[in-house]
Every structure is written in structure tokens, then in C-alpha cells.
């Protein structure tokens, strides 16, 4: 349970049982949206438990891969686009004027997602066998290797799609032009249309006509956020039929794992059972590594 006004998380033991976590989350969620009390208590508890366990699996996957991402050659060949969801802060600023600025754990989440996306891009190139073998780590060779990696991404890497507010979009456009960046500007698509929330990000998703998505798309965002994104995608269906959706969660800082998951589950439940703009039944095949993600 959290106090969202103060941005503080209570001390919750890491070994707290799932039942106790469900109870804590239920208090917060019903306080935030009393309309959810129309769902029978046992049913609500079961849904919260299901979502907590899905988010836990995303967090674990993110923690395991936050320093080194590995992608199979099969998955690497499928992915035509990486969709990076904008987040709190910007690439250069720890916070910006949004509802997350009161939460210390949300510091630089946008930068963390962008860095994770760049790491995923590199992992895909390496899985395709397009990157040169490692050379001796001399200062001169580092620059050469970065140049060759950038060329490989330009020729064989998936596109990166980013859509946020006009300010967020402008920062990303500036970042890709900076000297030393390994992602070529030609491979980054920053949406022209300004969006302000996740719903608008999903409903406005559109690639330029010249860009093919391939058979799969990769989604990069924070672990709890990805759970909500999936339900919106199931409802609005922004991709062609038979698209495989590969999930690459960014782990939440330890001090924010409980708080962020409760916030996202609250939104997910509201979208699904009150507003009717999200769906649990899959419209696509959602993959976390080699495991398919299905909400019970």
C-alpha cells in the first residue's frame, strides 16, 4: 500500500506472502478507484494476485538482463522494430514536470529505457552475426569497433520507434545526433504526433509507409508498465495480425517495485473492468524470452 500524495512507500518485507501483498494492494487500489469495489472481493483479489505474479516475472527477467541482454538468432531475425515507451525524466534530466516527479525511484526512467533499447539493438546485431569479433581493447580499436557496430546497425538493425510529448521527442531527436552514439539517426523514428499518456501512445502508433515491421516487434518499458501496455495492445490491436510481441522489461529500482506495481495494476484494472479499453485475452503472441505471457 502506498501514499501516492507523499510519494512514499511503506516498509514492506521482501518475503511478504503473495496474500499479504494482495491485501495491501487492494486497499490502495480501492482507495484510488472506488468503482472497482463492484468487482466481487475474491475475484478482485485473484486478479491482483495474477497481475502481481506477471509483474514479478517481468521484474526478474529485467534484473537478469539489465547489464547484458542475450537474444537468440531466431528472435533477432524476426524483430523489425523496437518500440521504446517514453518514461519519467528525460535522457538528460532526472525528472520533468509530470506525476512521477514526486517519486525518487522514478529518477531517469526514460534514460534507462533508452539505454536498454540501445543494448537490445546491439544484442540483435550480435545475434545476427553482423558485429565484428572483439578486438584487443586498445583506445584506438574502441572507436573503430563503435564505428563498425554503428554501420552494422544502419544496415541490418531493427528500427527504433519512440513517441512521447513534444519535449520528450525533441530530446530524443537531439540525443541521436550526438557524437559517439552507436544508434544511427536513420534508424530512429520519433513520432510527429505528440502524446501525453500510454493510451495515446498505443492508439497513435503508426510506422512510416517505408518501414516494414517484419514478423515481430519488441517492446521496451519498465516491468510494471509493460503489463498494462499488453492489455491496451490486446484491445486496440495496433499491429498486423499474427505479429509476435517480444517483451524486454526494464527492472524497477528496488525501492519502487511495490509502489509502481500497485499503481500499474490499479490502472490496468480500471481500463479493463470500468472503462472497457483494455483486454486480458491476447490478440497477439506475447513472449518473455522463450515463455509466452498469458493473463490467467
Image (spheres, rainbow, N blue to C red):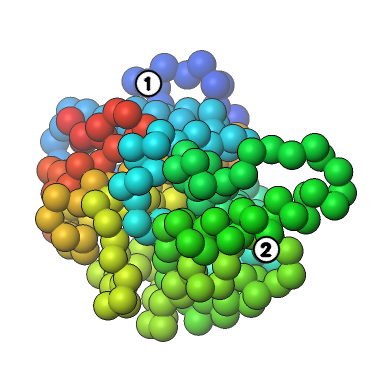
Q: Label 2, on which residue?
A: 181
Query: Is disc 2 placed on a helix, strand or loop?
Result: loop
Number of other residues with Cα within 10 Å of mark 2, as a class: few under 14, some 14 to 19, many 20 or more: some
Label 1 sits on residue: 18
Q: In this view, does 292 lie above or below 280?
A: above
Taking 178 as reference, is 224 left or right? left
Q: Is residue 210 visible?
A: yes
Whole-percent x and y of residue 139?
87, 49
Question: Is 209 left or right of 64, judged from the image as shown?
Answer: left
Q: Is residue 210 above or below residue 13?
A: below
Compared to residue 165, the image places residue 235 above or below, namely above
Towards the viewer: 61 or 96: 61
Give the percent coordinates (x, y) of residue 240: 16, 60
Crowding around mark 1 (Cα neighbors within 10 Å: few <14, some 14 to 19, many 20+) is some
Residue that extends furthest to the right in the rendered view of this protein? 139
Position of residue 271 relative to residue 259, above or below, is below
Residue at image coords 46%, 31%: 61
Amino acid at each position: 500500500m502506498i501514499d501516492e500524495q507523499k510519494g512514499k512507500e511503506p516498509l514492506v518485507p521482501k518475503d511478504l506472502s503473495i496474500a499479504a501483498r494482495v491485501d495491501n494492494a487492494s486497499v490502495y487500489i480501492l482507495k484510488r478507484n472506488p468503482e472497482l469495489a463492484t468487482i466481487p472481493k475474491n475475484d478482485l483479489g485473484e486478479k491482483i494476485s495474477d497481475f502481481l505474479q506477471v509483474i514479478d516475472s517481468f521484474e526478474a527477467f529485467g534484473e537478469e538482463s539489465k547489464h547484458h541482454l542475450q537474444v537468440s538468432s531466431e528472435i533477432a531475425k524476426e524483430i523489425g522494430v523496437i518500440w521504446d515507451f517514453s518514461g519519467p525524466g528525460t535522457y538528460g534530466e532526472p525528472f520533468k514536470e509530470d506525476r512521477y516527479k514526486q517519486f525518487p525511484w522514478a529518477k531517469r526512467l526514460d534514460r534507462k529505457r533508452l539505454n536498454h533499447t540501445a543494448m537490445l539493438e546491439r544484442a540483435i546485431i550480435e545475434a545476427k552475426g553482423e558485429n565484428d569479433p572483439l578486438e584487443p581493447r586498445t583506445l584506438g580499436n574502441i572507436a573503430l569497433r563503435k564505428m563498425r557496430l554503428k554501420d552494422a546497425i544502419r544496415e541490418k538493425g531493427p528500427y527504433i520507434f519512440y513517441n512521447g510529448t513534444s519535449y520528450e521527442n525533441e530530446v530524443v531527436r537531439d540525443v541521436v545526433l550526438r557524437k559517439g552514439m552507436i544508434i544511427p539517426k536513420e534508424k530512429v523514428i520519433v513520432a510527429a504526433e505528440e502524446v501525453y499518456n500510454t493510451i495515446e501512445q498505443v492508439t497513435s502508433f503508426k510506422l512510416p509507409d517505408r518501414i516494414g515491421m517484419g514478423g515481430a516487434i519488441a517492446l521496451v518499458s519498465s516491468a510494471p508498465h509493460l503489463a498494462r501496455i499488453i492489455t491496451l495492445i490486446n484491445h486496440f490491436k495496433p499491429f498486423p495480425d499474427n505479429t509476435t510481441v517480444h517483451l524486454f522489461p526494464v527492472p524497477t529500482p528496488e525501492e519502487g517495485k511495490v509502489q509502481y506495481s500497485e499503481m500499474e495494476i490499479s490502472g490496468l484494472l480500471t481500463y479493463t473492468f470500468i472503462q472497457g479499453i483494455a483486454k486480458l485475452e491476447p490478440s497477439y503472441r506475447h513472449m518473455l524470452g522463450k515463455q509466452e505471457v498469458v493473463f490467467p
